[in-house]
Structures are given as C-alpha cells and as structure tokens.
Image (cartoon, grey):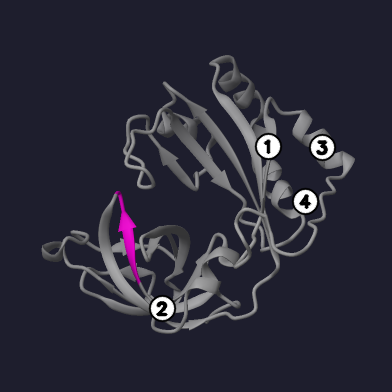
Amino acid sequence: MIDHSDATAEIYFLTAEEGGWNGPVFGKTFKIIMKIEDVFHDCCLYLLDAGHVIHPGDTLTIPVDFLFPEIVLPKIGIGSKFQLVVSKQTIAEGEFKMTRVSIEPSRIHASFRITGADLNPEEITELLKITPTSTKKKGEISILDDNPIPYSLWLLESDAKASNKFKPHLNYLLDSLESKKNILIELKARNYNMSFSLYVLTKHENVEGHIDSETLRRIADLPCNLWFDIYYDLGDEDEDV
C-alpha cells in the first residue's frame, strides 16, 4: 500500500461484452462508488503502479482509500468481495487483499457546493476555472435511491490530508475560491445556493470544533453559507441510544 492507504484490492475490470467500459480510462487517481454487501461507499483508486491507465479486461492490485473509513473498515476483511459501480452499472469486481486495522477515531471532511434547478455544471467549471470533484445534472437518477435528482450540483471537495481539525480542509477550499469572489457574487445573483459543508464522523470522543476568527472572516467575505453535519458512530451499540 502507498501512504497508509485504507486497503489494497485485486480488481477485475469487466470488458465491454461483460457490461464494462468500452475503452481505457486514464489518471493517477480515480474516484468511484464501491458496492459492498449492497451498501454504496465513496472511494478513490490509486493507479500510480498501474501506469495511470485501466484497460477493460485488466486485473489490477491497487491501493484504495475510503471517504469515511471509520464506517467501511470495521465491516470488511481480507477476502471481502465488492463491485465498482458507475450510474448503477457494475464495471468491475474485486476482493480485498489487505486492510488497515488502525483507523483514526474521527474524520472531518469539507466540501463546497453550488446547486440550482437550472444550473449548468459545465458553465460553472468554465467560469471558475476549477475542476470539480464531481457534478450532477437535474433529472439524473440517484444511485442511492433510484429517484431523479431535483437540482444540478457542482461539487469541490477538500484535497487536504486526513485531519481531525477543520482548518486544513477549509483553507484548501478558501485558497481555491477567494480569487473567484466576483464570479461567486454573480452566481448568487442567479439564485444559486452556495455553501461550505463540514462533515464530522466521530466515535467515542469529542471532536475539536474550533474555527479561528481569520478563517471565519474569509468565509464571511464570500456569498456562501456554512453547514455542519455531525454524526456519532455507535458501532455495535444499540441504535436507539
């Protein structure tokens, strides 16, 4: 594994005849949905040792990171099976060869999102000159509940190293967006919703909730809201607690 990745997996990428991709996919990293026992999880594949390319029919042993390893790692082990899914289509199958036993007790993740019923994600990318982490268009079918998505989405996630503090993640997003303030004001005038979102998953501990005044000032200087989603992982405890 590289850089203490969450797991290493052997993955077979289906051919077009088997329902997989029609051609190769290129990139150092590849973000995708992993399906484990009928539950969907966000993950990132590292293709550094695979020559930065996936060909249909390839079998690769590559590192995997999960967006929320605290949820996934306790539920998997060596030999656990999974599928990789794109738009409800299974494009690869695999099993874990190694998993990281020690996981940090809490995880903080940050994102910046722009949403709107008539939002055009490609236009937002062109205006901001920033490559988004992901985009969705109104009417696309959600892989989570099979319902049409009611609005379009442009999403930028923090690329900061894993941390149990807010500041590194917010700084990454603010450094990317502050020079685009006038464009964000223009988008706000179109009645698009813009917000920074902090997701916190904690297990048996308190999470440091400090955001310094300078970071708050930088956020307040942009026409955006700030949201917190804090979840407590009960593990095997009674869910009614």
Q: Earlier in the sequence, mark 4 or mark 1?
A: 4
Residue at mark 1: 227
Q: Amino acid at mark 2?
A: Ala
Among the two numbered marks 2 and 1 on one chain, the one whose residue lies closer to the N terminus: 2
Distance between mark 4 and mark 2 Cα atoms: 32 Å
Pointer 3 or 4: first along the chain = 4
Q: Residues within 10 Å of mark 3 (few under 14, many from 20)?
A: few
CA gap, disc 3 and disc 4: 10 Å
CA distance for labels 1 and 3: 13 Å
In this rendering, the answer to whether 150 lies above or below 55 is above
Span colored in magenta: 82-87
Q: Which residue is mark 4?
A: 167
Query: According to the image, label 2 marks what residue?
Result: 9
Residue at mark 4 to residue at mark 1: CA–CA distance: 14 Å
Q: What is the three-letter code of the residue carrying label 1?
A: Trp
Q: Picture quarter containing residue 222?
A: top right
- Residue 8 locus on image (x, y percent): 46, 79
